[in-house]
Amino acid sequence: MNLIFLGPPGAGKGTLAARVVEILHIPHISTGAIFRTAIAAQSPLGKKVKAIIDDGKLVDDATTIALVRERLMQTDTHAGYILDGFPRTIAQAEALAEFSAVDKVINFDLPDSAVLERLSGRRVCKNCGLNYHVIFNKPAQDGVCDSCGGQVYTRVDDREEAIAKRLAVYREQTEPLIGFYRDKGLLVDVDASPSVEKVVENFKAVIA
Ligand code: AP5
């Protein structure tokens, strides 16, 4: 099954994707995670996108589309995939339609106040990328990842100014994708406000 996870920053797309990987056994492809890995490795791609991402803006369409096109050529995507954070513009969605057929687009619905609470409290493992939250999902030992022992840190783009910019960018450039995919009959809405377990149940119900 080829899935797109669409929704505002901090809606819980990455958190749910980690659970869906265990249910559907398809890879989780997060463009944000790919960019963050490139930044950590100080690769040419990482150097190119670092300032853009830290500032909460979007990486250019050509770079992002080329990256996803190449990733979807890998054999682990043959049984399906979860695209998390792509497409984010109409141009990206049109390009994707030329090289892959999407089965369903899951639209995560969350009010801005909850987005702010989730992002400002988010902590991430520097090593394995696992997500935590200072209130909803704390690591057992402060600052240390439960899974790999890596350092748990705050993403640069989770600062208040960057969060506001990411939300504005989402409303302007990504939200139009809701109508784009609804018109094609591919969109299903999931309420992202309840607990992670409940969101997983809601997801299972909409893809059944
Ligand atoms: P990306 O990494 O995709 O960021 P995002 O879309 O802003 O999404 P997030 O990762 O912030 O949030 P999420 O929805 O995955 O929430 P999470 O599960 O972590 O992109 C980063 C940047 O890369 C972009 O700003 C852009 O610059 C660039 N980029 C990426 N893709 C691009 C593209 N296609 N084109 C151009 N540029 C691109 O959850 C958030 C927090 O809430 C966590 O702490 C979690 O523990 C907690 N939480 C989750 N679910 C629940 C729940 N149900 N209840 C309570 N807490 C919860």
Image (cartoon, rainbow, N blue to C red):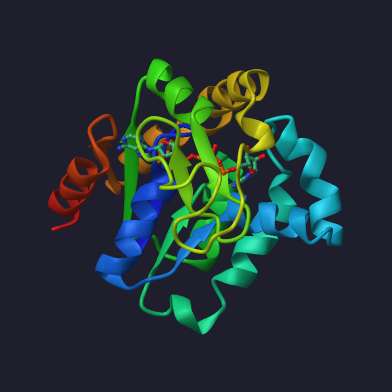
Q: Position of residue 66 (x, y in %)?
A: 69, 62
Q: Quadrant of residue 143?
A: top right
Left or right: where 130 falls relative to 201: right
Front-most of residues 161 and 205: 161
Reply above or below: 72 against 143.
below
Q: Position of residue 6 (x, y in %)?
A: 42, 42
Q: Quadrant of the N terminus?
A: bottom left
Q: Is residue 183 visible?
A: no
Q: Position of residue 192 (x, y in %)?
A: 29, 34
Q: Is residue 58 visible?
A: yes
Front-most of residues 11 and 142: 142
Q: Quadrant of the C terminus?
A: bottom left
Q: Quadrant of residue 19?
A: bottom left
Q: Position of residue 15 (x, y in %)?
A: 39, 48
Reply above or below: 103 against 88.
below
Q: Residue at x 62, y 19 (%)?
A: 160
